[in-house]
Image (cartoon, rainbow, N blue to C red):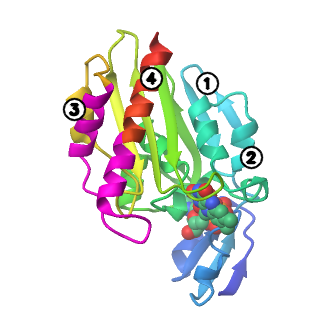
């Protein structure tokens, strides 16, 4: 329930309101904040979408994605990695993709988030208004400030893959996964693996990364068994722990295997 609505003219003013109002929430696309689950939660909404960058900028070895960029803009951009497009296109339908923003997806911080597995695997850095940049993982531990852009390092030879398992094509991800590796040597260097759906929030799996780091992609059955041994999902309405462990292991094996194909 929005009991106060602010439309600041600058990010500084928005930041000041965020600090001043106890129940402040940043209103970007509103596709999460204005959903029924917040109907009974009092909030002061601070409209920020007009203040955030809406551009996607390719620099030499990095990419800067404005926090105001919408999912459909990601899907339509020629600049972003295919895996990130794939993640953006996983969202329900074009109507929602036309509203939902990158910053809002980070702020919503849902386990089934479309973009967070990619940002975690890519070791994205978030730029913030008036604050130092912060890594995606650190921000998740202690969210603070207004995110203005997401920076992704894209050195030569870096490959990404994204996949999700959902009950139907337009449903939320039950398991979402992104992987990245540097493939210059033909092996999995700087491998990062992040999944949503196995716990309350998206997270990386450093134990599994370490098992595979610097190695050639193992045979599929071995890879699946390795992955399954690293997951301890919770039972919930979306599926049993055993089911989620199996689905997640299959997804990881698919995606790491697809990195091998990118390398070939
Ligand atoms: C039908 C439907 C389907 C959906 N499907 C998916 C899906 O497939 N995948 C998925 O991930 N989500 C899905 N969602 C949830 C939601 O659409 C997304 O999380 C979306 O990215 C939220 O973005 P927004 O701009 O609408 O955020 P808002 O609703 O405006 O804000 C969301 C949160 O982010 C915070 N926030 C907003 N901007 C910033 C910023 N710049 N810096 C810091 N914090 C900020 C806000 O304070 C708020 O807590 C769905 C929602 C609906 C209604």
Which residue is label 4 attached to?
Answer: 259
Q: Is residue 76 magenta?
A: no
Magenta residues, dominant SS class: helix
Dot label at residue 59: 1
For disc 3, does the CB lie below 8 Å from ligand 1?
no
Q: Which residues are magenta?
A: 220-249
Residue 27 showing in the rendered view: no
Distance between the Cα atoms at labels 1 and 2?
21 Å
- Rendered position, 107 above or below 212: below
Q: Earlier in the sequence, mark 1 or mark 2?
A: 1
Name the foreground residue: 41 vs 162.
Answer: 162
Horizontal side, residue 49 vs residue 62: left or right: right
- Rendered position, 58 above or below 194: above
Q: Is residue 222 magenta?
A: yes
Viewer-nearest of discs 2 and 4: 4
For disc 2, does the CB lie below 8 Å from ligand 1?
no
- Rendered position, 34 above or below 253: below
Q: Earlier in the sequence, mark 1 or mark 4?
A: 1
Q: Secondary structure at mark 4?
A: helix
Q: Earlier in the sequence, mark 2 or mark 4?
A: 2
Dot label at residue 210: 3
């Amino acid at each position: 329930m929005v009991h106060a609505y602010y439309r600041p003219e600058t990010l500084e003013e928005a930041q000041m309101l965020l600090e001043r109002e106890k129940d402040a929430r940043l209103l970007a696309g509103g596709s999460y904040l204005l959903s029924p689950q917040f109907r009974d939660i009092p909030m002061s909404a601070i409209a920020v979408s007009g203040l955030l960058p809406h551009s996607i900028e390719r620099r030499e070895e990095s990419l800067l994605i404005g926090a105001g960029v919408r999912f459909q803009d990601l899907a339509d951009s020629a600049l972003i990695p295919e895996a990130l497009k794939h993640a953006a296109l996983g969202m329900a339908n074009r109507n929602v993709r036309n509203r939902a923003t990158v910053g809002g997806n980070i702020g919503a911080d849902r386990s089934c988030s479309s973009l967070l597995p990619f940002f975690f695997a890519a070791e994205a850095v978030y730029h913030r208004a008036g604050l130092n940049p912060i890594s995606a993982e650190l921000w998740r531990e202690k969210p603070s400030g207004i995110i203005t852009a997401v920076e992704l390092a894209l050195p030569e030879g870096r490959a990404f893959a994204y996949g999700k398992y959902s009950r139907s094509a337009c449903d939320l991800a039950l398991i979402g996964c992104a992987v990245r590796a540097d493939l210059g040597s033909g092996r999995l260097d700087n491998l990062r693996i992040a999944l949503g759906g196995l716990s309350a929030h998206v997270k990386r799996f450093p134990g599994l990364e370490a098992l595979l780091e610097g190695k050639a992609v193992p045979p599929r059955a071995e890879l699946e068994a390795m992955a399954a041994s690293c997951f301890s999902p919770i039972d919930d309405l979306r599926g049993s722990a055993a089911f989620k462990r199996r689905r997640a292991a299959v997804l990881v094996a698919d995606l790491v295997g697809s990195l091998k194909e990118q390398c070939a």
